[in-house]
């Protein structure tokens, strides 16, 4: 056997070994590596899809929160306007009530003043009458009956005329 045979056998065995190695690599790739890569890719795609879903939910929540914020700002403005209007109305009612109470107190004070004036007049009148009666009694004790009657009648007539004049 010649060296060529061994060389051909060596080359053939290397070709067969290379083909077997390639077949083994294809089998290993198809059986183990390719499914692992597909599973890893599917897992990553699922993670990406989940993250996109969460992002979309977060965007929706942001949109809802933005709308709620706008509604709240509108409500705040409305409450402020309503509070200003209510405060103005309340101030007007307070002023009107105070004015009415002031007028009522003025009428009560005027009535009390009039009653005090009337009481003072009556007290003065009673005092004058008492003094007049006392003077008349003193004078009556010094005067005779006819002069006494004339003086009392004159005083009574004067008092009656003054009361009618008022």
Image (cartoon, rainbow, N blue to C red):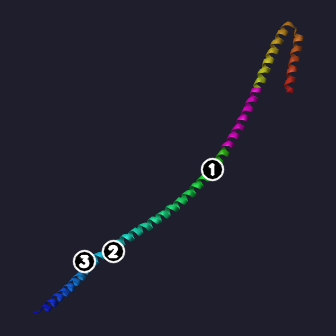
Main SS, magenta residues: helix
Q: Quadrant of the C terminus?
A: top right
Q: Quadrant of the N terminus?
A: bottom left
Does 103 sit left or right of 11 as displayed?
A: right
**Residue behind mark 3:** 32
The quarter of the displayed image where residue 99 is located: top right
Give the extent of the magenta segment. 94-117
| Residue that sits furthest to the front in the current view | 3
**Residue behind mark 2:** 41
Is 101 in front, or is 114?
A: 101
How many numbered marks, from 0 up? 3
Residue 13 rendering spot, x and y as whole percentages: 17, 87
In primary-sequence order, the first of circles 3 and 2 is 3
In primary-sequence order, the first of circles 2 and 1 is 2
Residue 73 rendering spot, x and y as whole percentages: 56, 57
Is 100 in front, or is 114?
A: 100
Residue 87 rendering spot, x and y as whole percentages: 63, 47
As measured in the structure, the alpha-carbon distance from the residue carrying label 2 to the one carrying label 1 is 63 Å
Q: Nearer the viewer, mark 2 or mark 1?
A: 2
In primary-sequence order, the first of circles 3 and 1 is 3
Q: Residue at x 86, y 19 (%)?
A: 156
Residue 99 is inside the magenta segment: yes
**Residue behind mark 1:** 84
């Amino acid at each position: 056997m010649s060296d060529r045979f061994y060389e051909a056998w060596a080359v053939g065995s290397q070709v067969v070994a290379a083909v077997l190695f390639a077949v083994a690599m294809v089998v290993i790739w198809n059986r183990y590596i390719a499914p692992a890569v597909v599973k890893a890719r599917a897992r990553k795609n699922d993670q990406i899809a989940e993250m996109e879903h969460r992002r979309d939910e977060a965007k929706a929540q942001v949109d809802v929160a933005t709308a709620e914020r706008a509604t709240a700002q509108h409500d705040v403005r409305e409450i402020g306007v309503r509070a200003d209007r209510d405060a103005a109305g309340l101030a007007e009612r307070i002023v009107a009530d105070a004015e009415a109470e002031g007028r009522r107190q003025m009428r009560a004070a005027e009535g009390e003043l009039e009653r005090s004036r009337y009481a003072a007049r009556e007290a003065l009148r009673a005092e004058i009458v008492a003094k007049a009666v006392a003077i008349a009694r003193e004078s009556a004790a010094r005067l005779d009956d006819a002069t006494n009657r004339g003086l009392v009648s004159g005083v009574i007539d004067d008092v009656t005329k003054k009361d009618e004049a008022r």
